Image (cartoon, helix red, strand yellow):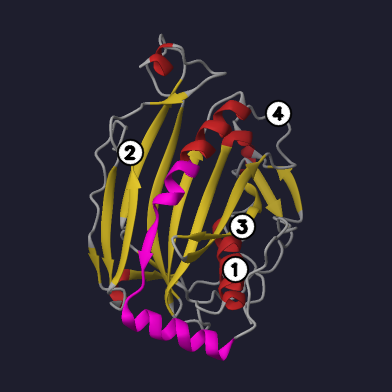
């Protein structure tokens, strides 16, 4: 209550619930738990789905359209319903009733069984290539036409959480080079990813998306602090079948390791930019020229 009373743009705050609660999910025999504050948001919470058959192909969306450079996509499927989704508002001065920011936590699974060379998610080197490839299509040049640019991956880490190895990374939205005068809060919009294998061809992605307020530094500190509070609550116990696949992968790839550090990818989002001619019914922003190709998966 005191935090809310004395909150400001320099000291934004979350509502402080009296307790957090634990969501428990069965992912084809894998047991996953995460502990979160109750939702603090105007809209109803998306109800947690407690049991998933990860081997049901109807669960996934597979994007097979060529990307904007004409490269064929690799047919990685993302589960259509999120397993759960929760939102929390951040608040500024007490006299400003509307929230000034939002943090969202959600989770999906990736299915890699349709990728031609059949990567093994329990092979850290192949899993790392899958992650960077996914960043290209979610935060990189494969995501848009130049309107949104990101520094990614940032703060790449390999975290051991209750005996399970997770990849942690952040993607920070940046002001595009063509946009000199925007007042949008680029500096305080970012996402954090946590990824770990579930089966040889399935993995789990937990995402925390932050849309903050200016000034950016106190907002970012608040968002990252809550993310750091959530991370230790991730508990994953692999099923006997998943453990068998994990052991087989360790035997087949005994020297495979994740990179301990990774700099942000030096991706080009477009070749050139000009303002569109509205009188000729052009778009407001015209991006031309090729972007960087997708990173190699093999």
Distance from label 4 to label 3 (Cα)? Answer: 34 Å
Q: Say whether residue 214 is left or right of residue 288.
A: left
- Considering only order in the chain, which callout, 2 or 4, is on the residue closer to the N terminus? 2
Main SS, magenta residues:
helix
- Choose mark 1 or mark 3, whichever is in front: 3
**10 Å crowding of disc 1: few (<14), some (14-19), many (20+):** some
Quick one: quadrant of the N terminus?
Answer: top left
Q: Nearer the viewer, residue 136 or 8?
A: 8
The residue singled out by tag 2 in the image is 37
Any mark on residue 181, and which?
4
Label 4 or label 2, whichever lies nearer to me, is: 2
Q: CA distance from mark 4 to mark 2?
A: 37 Å
Q: Residue furthest front?
A: 163
Q: Which comes before the other along the chain, label 2 or label 3?
A: 2
Residue at 63 percent of width and 27 percent of height: 183
Give the Cα separation between the discs numbered 1 and 3. 17 Å
Image marks 1 and 4: residues in contact by CB distance under 8 Å: no
N-terminal label among 4 and 3: 3
Circle 4 residues within 10 Å: few <14, some 14–19, many ≥20: few
Drawn side of residue 18 relative to residue 271, left or right:
left
Q: Which mark is residue 193?
A: none
Which quadrant of the view contains residue 238? bottom left
Residue 282's place in the image compared with 256, above or below, is: above
Please tell me whether mark 1 sits on a helix, a strand or a loop: helix
Q: Give the class, few, some or many, for how many residues have Cα within 10 Å of label 3's Cα (few <14, many ≥20).
A: some
Q: Which residue is mark 3?
A: 157
| Quadrant (top left/top right/bottom left/bottom right) for the C terminus | bottom right
Q: Which type of secondary structure does the marked residue at label 3 adopt?
A: strand
Marks 1 & 2, CB-CB < 8 Å contact: no
Q: Residue at x 33, y 47 (%)?
A: 35
Q: Label 1 vs label 2: CA separation? A: 32 Å
For the record, the magenta segment spans 227-253
């Amino acid at each position: 209550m005191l935090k809310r009373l004395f909150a400001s743009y320099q000291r934004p705050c979350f509502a402080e619930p009296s307790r957090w609660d634990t969501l428990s999910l069965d992912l084809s025999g894998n047991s996953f738990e995460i502990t979160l504050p109750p939702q603090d948001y105007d809209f109803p919470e998306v109800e947690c789905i407690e049991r998933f058959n990860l081997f049901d192909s109807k669960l996934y969306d597979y994007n097979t359209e060529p990307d904007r450079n004409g490269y064929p996509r690799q047919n990685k499927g993302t589960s259509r319903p999120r397993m759960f989704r929760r939102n929390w508002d951040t608040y500024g001065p007490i006299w400003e009733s509307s929230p000034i920011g939002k943090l969202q936590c959600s989770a999906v699974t990736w299915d890699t069984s349709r990728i031609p060379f059949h990567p093994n998610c329990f092979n850290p080197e192949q899993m790392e290539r899958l992650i960077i490839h996914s960043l290209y299509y979610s935060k990189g040049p494969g995501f848009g036409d130049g309107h949104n640019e990101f520094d990614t991956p940032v703060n790449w880490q390999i975290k051991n959480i209750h005996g399970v190895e997770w990849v942690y990374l952040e993607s920070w939205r940046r002001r595009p080079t063509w946009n000199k005068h925007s007042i949008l809060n680029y500096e305080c919009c970012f996402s954090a990813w946590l990824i770990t294998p579930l089966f040889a061809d399935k993995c789990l992605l937990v995402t925390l998306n932050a849309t903050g307020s200016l000034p950016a530094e106190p907002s970012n500190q608040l968002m990252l602090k809550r993310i750091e509070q959530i991370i230790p609550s991730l508990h994953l116990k692999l099923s006997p079948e998943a453990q068998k696949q994990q052991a087989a992968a360790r035997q087949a790839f005994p020297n495979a390791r994740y990179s301990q550090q990774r700099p942000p990818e030096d991706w080009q989002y477009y070749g050139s930019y000009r303002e569109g001619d509205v009188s000729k019914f052009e778009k407001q922003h015209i991006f031309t020229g090729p972007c960087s190709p997708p990173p190699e998966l093999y």
